[in-house]
Amino acid sequence: MKQLNRTNVQANKYPERIIQFGEGNFLRAFVDWIIYNMNQKAEFNSSVVIVQPLENGMVNMLNEQDGLYHVNLQGLQNGKEVDSIQLIDVVSRGLNPYAQYNEFLKLAENPEMRFVISNTTEAGIAFDPSCKLEDAPAKSYPGKLTQLLFHRFKVFNGAMDKGLIIFPCELIFDNGKVLKKCIDQYIELWNLGEDFKHWFDTACGVYCTLVDRIVPGYPRDTIGQILDRIGLDDKLVVKGEIFHLWVIEAPETVEREFPADKAGLNVLFVPSEKPYHDRKVTLLNGPHTVLSPVGYLAGLNTVKECCEDPVIGQFVKKVMYGELLETLDLPKEELILFADAVMERFRNPFVKHFVTSIMLNSFPKFKTRDLPGLKIFLERKKELPSGLVLGLAGIVTYYKGGKRGNDEIVLKDDQEIIDLLKNLWTDGCPMEVAKGVLGAEFIWGEDLNLIPGLTEKLSEYLRMIQDKGMIETVKSIL
């Protein structure tokens, strides 16, 4: 089988207008796929130069394939199964700044360069005071970006039309603001001057974004079938779900330069990213967190099984549509459409998402994803959301440990939390367990026993799970 490269396959070439920090699966299956569609459908006419953020990475492998690779998208779309494969031709080349620092700086000298996009993991956007301007390159991503911006400022003598539009895709809230703050810190630390600071503040824009697409990565289990379909040897195939969403907090002037809407893509330019961040955390991550222990203790193993089970499936819908959706402030029709899309994603026949993998750090997850909704629901409806409270009871019961049938329950959380639950369950009194868990301020930052009725309701569900099992307990609230 021939190697995938530009000798063995015809592929388009475009002007280099985008610098991308990160060569990982997510950016290639999400951002570069979006750019491919913009080139095809909106005459965006842009290619990407990928910069490897760490010294050891994949740009050599990418360059061996001349920047080409395939994206395999799978999932449900409008109730129908989709299993597509697309050749992505938007990456012109990859650079390792640790070995090619001068080539890296030369990217700033290209007058056509306009965008910087990144995904360097949540830990990537951080200020490291040990970085120096003379480093080749700076260790941190914000340090490297500051070096690049300062070089561009000097090359073009501070020309206001040579600023860059910067879209961080790291999964932290207000990622653009956090990145800008880091760059400001380097400007001060390295004494880069007021003129550069003014140019950065006015000619460049660092915008907050929210990205959403599940990307499992290299499809090891089906790669043979995929290569048969492609007819070429592609070592960088990346698998993703069909759903995609990119929310960008930026003005219309930026939207006009990044015409994703003309390509029919689910890319939204909005005044504030926060409602969409809240929507994703509440309607995607929130149900995940509570369906996992409830489904597992009901004898189910995957998210898809939970959603398709006649009892647990109704529980998931109750939590999502009847409880969490009621706590958000976007238009209800829009929220229902998003919730419907989430349910399709949960039922993706191509992805086995095991609920035990979601159980990692369940208590902090419940705190950030479900507790705010519990409080808002109580405030608005004057009653506790029974599904969310039962979900918390499921987590507390799961962390009792022991076995489910022949399977050992493996607890993965902060050891202090595991020890607390072990001690509370030693007595086994549901009321004492409820009081102890809710009163653990090192988990919640507050005493949840002060929420009216919560201690009693949690205790009631803990007792019912012990006496009747999870299925009967869920039936009692439906």
Image (tube, rainbow, N blue to C red):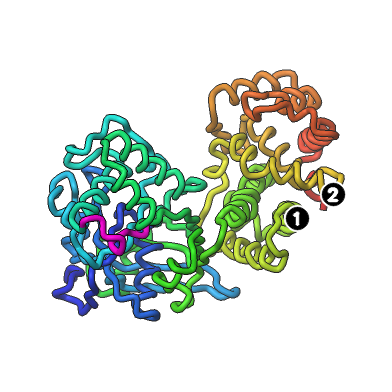
The residue labelled by disc 1 is 326
Q: Secondary structure at mark 1?
A: helix
Measuring from the top left, give residue 60's x and y in whole percent. 17, 55
Mark on residue 381?
2
Say if 40 sits above or below 473 in the image.
below
Q: Secondary structure at mark 2?
A: helix
In the image shown, does 16 or 218 lie closer to the viewer? 16
In the image shown, does 404 or 284 lie closer to the viewer? 284
Say if 310 sits above or below 413 in the image.
below
Q: In the image, 400: left or right of 411?
A: right
Query: Which residue sits at x=44%, y=68%?
Result: 253
Measuring from the top left, give residue 214's x and y in whole percent. 47, 57
In the image shown, does 292 or 117 lie closer to the viewer? 117
Residue range in magenta is 157-166
Instruction: Kindly identify the amino acid type of the residue bearing the numbered disc 1.
Output: Glu
3D distance between C-alphas at marks 1 and 2: 9 Å
Is 159 covered by the magenta stretch? yes
Quarter of the image holding residue 76? Answer: bottom right
Say if 252 sits above or below 461 in the image.
below
Mark on residue 447?
none
Instruction: Kindly identify the amino acid type of the residue bearing the numbered disc 2.
Output: Lys
Q: Are marks 1 and 2 in contact (CB under 8 Å)?
A: yes
Is 274 covered by the magenta stretch? no
**Mark 2 residue crowding within 10 angstroms, few (<14) / some (14–19) / many (20+):** few
**Mark 1 residue crowding within 10 angstroms, few (<14) / some (14–19) / many (20+):** some
Quarter of the image holding residue 127? Answer: top left
In the image shown, does 470 or 343 lie closer to the viewer? 343
Measuring from the top left, give residue 345's x and y in whole percent. 56, 62
Say if 171 sits above or below 444 in the image.
below
Query: Which residue sits at x=35%, y=49%?
Result: 198
